[in-house]
Image (tube, grey):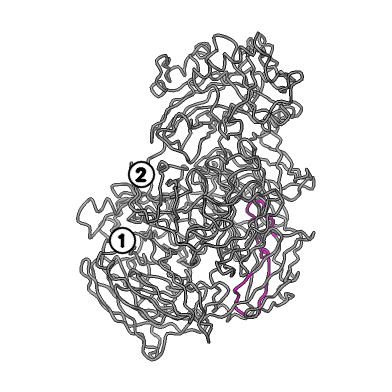
Amino acid sequence: MLTRDPSMPQSSKAGRLFSKVRAALVVCAALVVCVAAPGPLQTFAQTSAQREAPTTITGRVTDGEHGLPGVAVVLMSSEPTTRFREAAHAKTDAEGNYRLTNVQPGNYKLLPFAPVYVVEGLSMYDYPPGKPLNLSAGESVENIDFRLVRGGVVTGRITDADGNPVIAERVSVMPVDKNQQALMRGPTDPRDYSTDDRGVYRIYGLPPGSYHLSVGQDNNGAVSFGSRKLYQRTFYPDATDEAQAKTVEVTAGGETTDIDIKLGAAMKTFRASGRFVNAETGQPVANISYSYGPITTDGNFRGGFRGGFTTNARGEFQTDGLTPGRYTVFTASFPSMQDSSEFYGDPLNFEVVDADVTGLVVKLHTGASVSGVVTFEGVSDGATAARLLPSLRLYAYTEATNQAVLPNNASVPAIAADGSFRIAGLRPGRLRFNLVDTGAKGLTLSRAELNGANVTGGVDVAEGAQVAGLRVVVAYGSGVIRGQVNFAGGELPQDARLFVSARRVGAGGGGAIGPGSSAVQADARGRFVVHGLPPGEYEVQAHVMVFEPGGRPSQSESQHVSLAEGGDMNVTLTIDFAAPAKGGKP
Amino acid sequence: MKTSRALAALLFITLACALNSAAGARAQESVVVQSDIPKPQAAQTTSPQNAATAAARADKTDKTKRAADTITGRVLGEGGEPLGGISVAAIPRSFTPNYRAPHTALTDDEGGFRVVGLEPGIYSVSASVPGYVTEPDPLTGRVGGEYKPGDPATVRLVKGGVITGAATDAQGEPLVALGVRAYRVRDLDGRLPPPNAVYVGAGRTDDRGVYRIYGLQPGAYVVLAGGPSSASFGLASPYGADAPTFYPSSTRDTAAEVTVRAGAEAAGVDIRYRDEPGHRVTGKVEFQTPPSDPTNSVGLILSYASSNIQAATDYLNLSASGISFSFEGITDGDYDLQASITGRDGLVSVAPPQRVTVRGADVSGLRVTLAPLASVSGTLAVEPATEAERARAGCEGAHAPLPPQETLITATFDRAASAKAQPAPRFSLTREATPDDAGAFTLRSLEAGRYRLSVHPFDENLYVRSIQLPGANAPATPAAPRTNIATQGTTRAAAAAAPPAREVLDIRSGQQLSGVVVRLAEGASALSGHVFAADGAQAPPYASLRVHLLPAEREHADDPLRFFETTPGADGAFSFKSLPPGRYLLLARVVADAHEAAPRPAFRDADARASLRREAEAAGTTVELQPCRRTSDFALRFPPPAPK
């Protein structure tokens, strides 16, 4: 969504928020690509035959007893390139029945738009919210029913120590009974949880139950953005200790009012500053990209990072708005921004107690480099390769010895028109690769080679080494594996989600997820479609995932499929809930 | 087991990312809500506010030793009361790819702050407090001012206005979770916002259908509900494909305006939702030259014709094959379609605005061609006076040299001259740069068209002696004296005798022009005064006046660097600084564009300069400005006495 003048130069908020957005993107890129499969790569490309064979979806929306009239049922695309786009919507009739017609084949999420209600059977794990629906050409889908529970309202006012309204402060609503998390609010907006200019908040569509309401930051480090004041987390009515929190009861269709929270004084914030220096020469390093943010007491990363800043000519960095707590500062190349640096360095942890922190020194080392070329297989002509290359993004990251992904050593190198790339500033360790899911069709990491050796699982990079001649082979394909998952010995539990993976034998990392494998969510009927597959031998397997504690995952036998170029294979998989849980193929 | 857990992790992470992205989108949105987009400003047109600040700055500079890395100041509320505990940030004014963390400081109980550790440069100083706004400069629309380290700064925060009401359907039932936006179409004085200034607030109806949009800049707003831009990121909404309903129950043409005052609430802005389907507008993006960075994305904006009100936006991931865009919920009417790519170096490509007309049906097959933007680079040289020159000019001892970073170089798009090829609105009318420590500067993100270069040294002792452009790129006029970069190494005498500045540039799409040389010289004069009414006349119409200062000497008669103009303040006060010493003519006159954000200068070309000169000579007010001297309390009569 583009909501600002794209030409806007760096102004105060723009700059800060830009970096915030940048950081969020980076976190996304870093996490998704290192664990996620390329995913469903098909866009809305449709043949004319498909266009002529739209589908119809029907069902009913009830409150458990009666049909609910006038509820809009919205079908949203869940394809990567058109995600969140509305494909169709229809209103329920007097009996609560709805009918969506003229829907094109594709993968969707379906959701009744009834924000004052709670949709049963959906949870926070369903994002974007809705029931998955994978539609083939010409089929009619019936009885996609939704049961809604009337939500409740909680409202009140947030004031500071002087009794003044606290504006644009987000109110946290935590169910005391953890089972409530299985219930999903209707479509929500962060503004719904935030106070207005009078300090008033009003949250509606809450699942009935008991809650703790609170405002503020947890007591172990937070970074203030802009001129926003930070407050210590305070529970209704004025408790900083959750044990003293008063429980708020929300009833179906009821309104719980005057849930006012009184905050204490704003937290003091401090500044930390220092320099990035070259560990070998002791010289300051200018224009190094850095990020900082809070860490847990055992040194793990927490949310709320700020980044995208660069050191000045004297190698200096500074961080502002830090509440007392533990923090880390590190150089980070930003995969989404194609920053590059010849340096790497370990994060420097520091603690803010009751004063500014000065004189921090972060040591940088000249890193190793790896250069090579990307080539395609399954692409016969240069024109197609030239068209595909811009949509290709290679992601490389160094895996630490303890298998952890280091947050500050991921790179998305620029790929030149001839396919060549260079990654610099690498720390010693195993450099692994994957493709960033750009939403482009049909690209899968096939293998990586170095001097004839297969290094698909990663290249071991020594301190300061200059590795050349890496060849990353990317397979292009337009094949489809689709099918049906059946259940034996039981039904799919309501809190379970069903996924299907298609792993290309001999490609990528060899796992059901990760390079060389694609995974998609199946819909409630067990239908699934995996698009954009290169020809080859595939292992196709269905997986049931259960998010609630005590839930038992299960999976189908793996099915072998030979997929020809541009082929379209149909597979039936069976999950036997009566069978003992198996380890399955890693 | 293992696989399932891994898949769970995958889902979790995808979820986390989706939420993160949503946070990103929200962040962007709030950028717009309290926009402080720098507004077009002709650097040689100084506003009274800036002038007043400059005067205060000059006093301060004289009295206290300059703290070279500190901006000190105060944050004040609407009634001038000090505001404590507010975080203030100093943000470099010009874009650099290497983004430095903003320097910030907290105000004390007296509202005072000290932002320390600043490198030389030009900064805007601002505080962003939820629900509060900083009133923009009434002339430039700019928020945050312009300060160099050592300057005192004042930040005024006022409580933003509120628009609140309820949205109902045709049956009078409340509409829940309906997105409502408010666009400022005029300020309280009736001025239109500059083309790139979008002041918008957004809200959403609650379970009772009530919405409340707060923190609004004072001004006149139109309020619209539903439509393509109303959906929240990632959330299903049945309103997205509707045509938006403007308050009270209208289309854009018949929308009522809502007046918002600082700290006040405009209540009862109730919307009866029309629930009308809109049309679809689709097309493809093309590239004049392939985008250099495939990680970039194309942003598309469809706005109501000749306004800043966005009807719909789309965002295309360049990497995905198929670069088709689509807007839904578009109602009958005229629109402007713009597209842009923002890269690491800022805006890198744009498509010229394209008029799209929707009449009762979907529009398809549009083609939007993105062209690379141009840049202009050059060097800034500060020429200190010799001891002999200082003595001759009567200037006192040597001043600390101005760091090159503390000069603002602005390229202002000449709307009238470029209008044929490039219809309004445009992304921005001005681009700015500050040189680096070696004096090198680059003005980026320039669309094709005619630009006027202006140079604003943040040191009243300096004035612009010359601007030299690579000759081949200066607009072709028969008498154009050709200059070239070779003159850069010539002696000061030669430079002083160099032909008058050619401050007008014609830029082609994607051009990378280099070799501009800007020379600053020491010994500037300053002039301030008041416009006063002729005997027995009414008070002059200050709000529609402009004061012109132009060279009286024949040899400088056509030197655009010796033409200055400003709009007097509400009390008639005017001020000029960084003036080349010499004899000048002064003229106050009523102009039609007194409150345009970036008026075309009256000295824009030789004919205009000659005409202005004839008018000023007839009025007959002259002033002799000595080097290093500040002439104040100059009384300028309006209307000027009748010619003898």
Q: Classify 10 Å Cα crowding around label 2: few (below 14), some (14-19), many (20 and above).
A: some
The residue nearer to you, when weighing A159 against A372, is A159
Q: Residue at x 48, y 80 (%)?
A: A96
- Is residue A212 magenta-colored? yes
State yes or no: discs 2 and 1 in contact (Cβ < 8 Å). Answer: no
Q: Is residue B264 visible?
A: yes
Local SS, label 2: strand
Q: Position of residue A363 (x, y in %)?
A: 54, 49
- Is residue A255 magenta-colored? no
Q: Nearer the viewer, mark 2 or mark 1?
A: 2
**Which residue has dot 1 on it?**
A443
Determine which quarter of the picture holds residue A115.
bottom right
Query: Magenta span covers which residues?
Result: A203-230
Q: Residue at x 62, y 35 (%)?
A: B139
**Which residue has dot 2 on it?**
B369
Q: Classify 10 Å Cα crowding around label 1: few (below 14), some (14-19), many (20 and above).
A: many
Residue A257 lies, with reference to residue A421, above or below; the image says below
Local SS, label 1: strand
Quarter in which the N terminus of chain B is drawn: bottom left
The residue nearer to you, when weighing B30 against B607, is B607
Task: Give how far apart the Cα atoms at labels 2 and 1 are.
Answer: 27 Å
Quarter in which the C terminus of chain B is drawn: top right
